Image (cartoon, grey):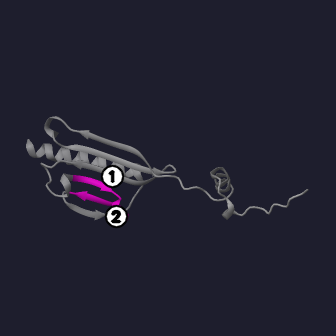
Amino acid sequence: MTVDIPPASSQDITCPQMARQTRRNGIKPSRPVEKRIDETSYLTGEGRGACLREEVWSKGGEVVRYNLAYINRRQCSMDNGRVLGYDNSHDHHHRHYKGHVEKIEFPGYDALLSRFQNELQQFWRMEDEETD
């Protein structure tokens, strides 16, 4: 006795293993966003009470969200103490400086990290000159 079994449509798939095969055969599963960097450094000495914050999320090797911040509540009482920072929350890239926020062009994460580090060094140099 022969039984004719009609071909299964994608709507008939109920087994998770068969569903995985279907995704491999045409529908790409979305990659999750992963938090790759989550670092906080608390400063000591003259910078005591301040911190540096770096957070980076990526998807498929591409940075999709980031937050760079120098936080010192003695320097800035606004913006949760963020003296200098960059992030892309609220669907746009922007720079924070002592309570003021401005949109920026995003040159890529590595270039932005370098810009943040250079600005921070310059800020600390000016701060040192003012105390001398």
Query: Is residue 19 rendered to the left or right of residue 3?
Result: left
Task: Check the picture and name the quadrant holding the C terminus.
Answer: top left
Q: Give percent across and percent down for residue 114.
A: 35, 47
Mark 2, other Cα within 10 Å: few <14 / some 14–19 / many ≥20: few
Is 130 in front, or is 52?
52
Q: Which residue extends farthest right? A: 1
Q: Residue at x 23, y 39 (%)?
A: 42
| Residue 120 covered by magenta stretch | no
How far, Cα to Cα, is label 1 from label 2? 12 Å
* SS under mark 2: helix
* SS under mark 1: strand
Query: Is residue 92 rendered to the left or right of residue 100?
Result: right
Q: Give percent across and percent down for residue 45.
A: 15, 35
Labels 1 and 2 touching (C-beta < 8 A): no
**Magenta segment, principal secondary structure?**
strand
Q: Which residue extends farthest left? A: 132
**Amino acid identity at mark 1:** Asn
Q: Residue at x 16, y 58 (%)?
A: 78
Q: Which residue is mark 2?
A: 90
**Amino acid identity at mark 2:** His
Q: Give percent across and percent down for residue 92.
A: 36, 64
Count of all numbered marks drawn on residues in the image: 2
Is 46 in front, or is 51?
51
Instruction: Identify the mark at residue 67; answer none if there is no mark.
Output: 1
Is 121 in front, or is 62?
62
Please give the range of residues in magenta: 83-97
Q: Residue at x 72, y 64 (%)?
A: 9
Task: Check the picture and name the quadrant holding the N terminus.
Answer: bottom right
Is 127 in front, or is 83?
83
Q: Is residue 104 above or below residue 36?
A: below
